[in-house]
Image: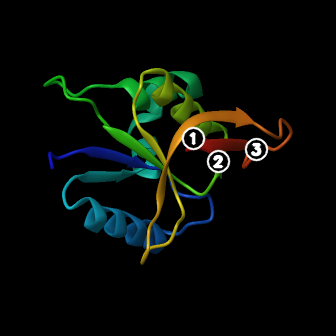
Amino acid sequence: MPTCGVFLHPKQNWDAERIAEALESITRLMGTGSLVSGREVYDAHFKKAGRNWDRWAIKVATGRNLDGTPYYDFFVVPGDSCARATAAIVSEALKVGKPVLAWNEDLDAPVFARVTQIYDSEPSNRWHGWRLVTV
């Protein structure tokens, strides 16, 4: 299996230990790869995107390294819902045909489902108003 860049967007209430456990679990499952927490990406690159959410989401989903390889080969979202920023990243990734996976959040018996679309189910709820549609 080739080395992949994987973007994991943690839930709002996850602490650093939970994020590390999730990254380790997914790395074990993949066998190889480079997993990055969405919080790390935000901290490193949001200012560079002019603090613009839309520009940042596009950069995360479609950005490339200097050697032409994509920043991320696929995206993992825990659960079946997400907040606005993650929804924007998922939407951009789906537009360009990158795989997006919903994860059941189980560290011992992980299950992933391919996301085919995302929609705003609760316009008034910016934290968890977007739902992932999976197959």
In the rendered structure, which amino acid carries the disc numbered 2? Cys
In the rendered structure, which amino acid carries the disc numbered 3? Gly
On screen, residue 54 versus residue 63, left or right, reads right
Secondary structure at badge 3 equals loop
Q: CA distance from mark 3 to mark 1?
A: 11 Å
Quadrant in the picture for residue 13: bottom right
Q: Answer with mark 3 or mark 1, whichever residue precedes in sequence.
A: 1
Residue 97's spot in the image, x, y percent?
Answer: 41, 25
Question: In front: 119, or 38?
Answer: 119
Q: Residue at x 86, y 39 (%)?
A: 124
Q: Are marks 1 and 2 in contact (CB under 8 Å)?
A: yes
Q: Quadrant of the C terminus?
A: top right
Q: Residue at x 53, y 41 (%)?
A: 115
Q: Residue at x 61, y 37 (%)?
A: 87
Question: In front: 62, or 79?
Answer: 79
The residue identified by callout 3 is: 129
Residue 55's spot in the image, x, y percent?
Answer: 51, 21
Q: CA distance from mark 1 to mark 2?
A: 6 Å
User: Pointer 1: residues within 10 angstroms few (<14), some, or many (20+)?
Assistant: many
